[in-house]
Amino acid sequence: MDDNKKLSDINPLAPIVSSEHLTSPDSWPLSEFEYGMIIAHNAFSRWMIRCMHAAGYSDFSPLDVLVLHNVNHRNRKKKLVDICFVLHIEDQHTVNYSLKKLVKTELVDREKHGKEILYFVTDKGEEACSRYREVREQCLTSAYRTLGQEGSEISQAAALLRLMSGLYDQASRAASSL
């Protein structure tokens, strides 16, 4: 292929990517996947904010919503480091900020055990999560069910995303050593 020609110049049905200049002839599927992740991430972030707002809680970031639901998960008290680990977040200070915000709004509380601080959802936080679930059922889950998708297809997509996150983690470690 001529170096000055782009795949989209040759094939109008070329894959949809966000940054054609980053692709090489054999990496189009990866670039297509990345663009899919970009738009899915932004749509999911927008959804969490709007769902939380519809549940009666505005001024929450996507991270705040994720942290709230993680703290509520399995009704167990959690340490900051465990929340970061499960959500795969390196910057603990961002999760700590969300926890402070959630404590201030009385959706989450904390207690000290020795040197550790454990976080847990309050009754108000549990109600917020329940209301979020109701909105999710009404707006998202019901629409998902009408698609008639097999659960196994979604599970396969989730497995692929976890696999790709491992590849991106390894690549980021490699890039750090350059």
Image (tube, helix red, strand yellow):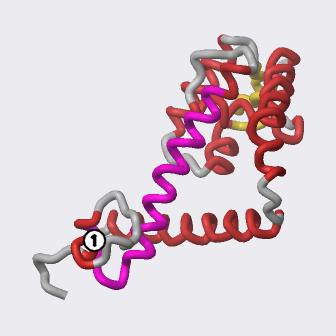
The amino acid at mark 1 is Ser
Q: Is residue 121 left or right of residue 21?
A: right
Q: Is residue 12 left or right of residue 75?
A: left
Whether residue 66 is situated above or below residue 17 in the rendered picture: above
Whether residue 35 is situated above or below residue 80 in the rendered picture: below
Q: Residue 29 placed where, x, y %?
A: 44, 75
Residue beneath the point at 62% across and 44% down: 84
Q: Is residue 126 left or right of residue 44?
A: right
The residue lying furthest to the left in this view is 4
Is 92 inside the magenta-drawn segment?
Answer: no
Q: Looking at the rendering, in which quadrant would you find the C terminus?
A: bottom left
Per the image, the residue denoted by label 1 is 8
Q: Looking at the rendering, in which quadrant would you find the N terminus?
A: bottom left
Residues 114 and 145: in front is 145
Q: Residue 68 placed where, x, y %?
A: 71, 30
Q: Which SS class for mark 1? A: helix
Residue beneath the point at 83% across and 42% down: 142
Quadrant of residue 63 in the image? top right
Q: Is residue 114 visible?
A: no
Residue beneath the point at 68% across and 50% down: 86
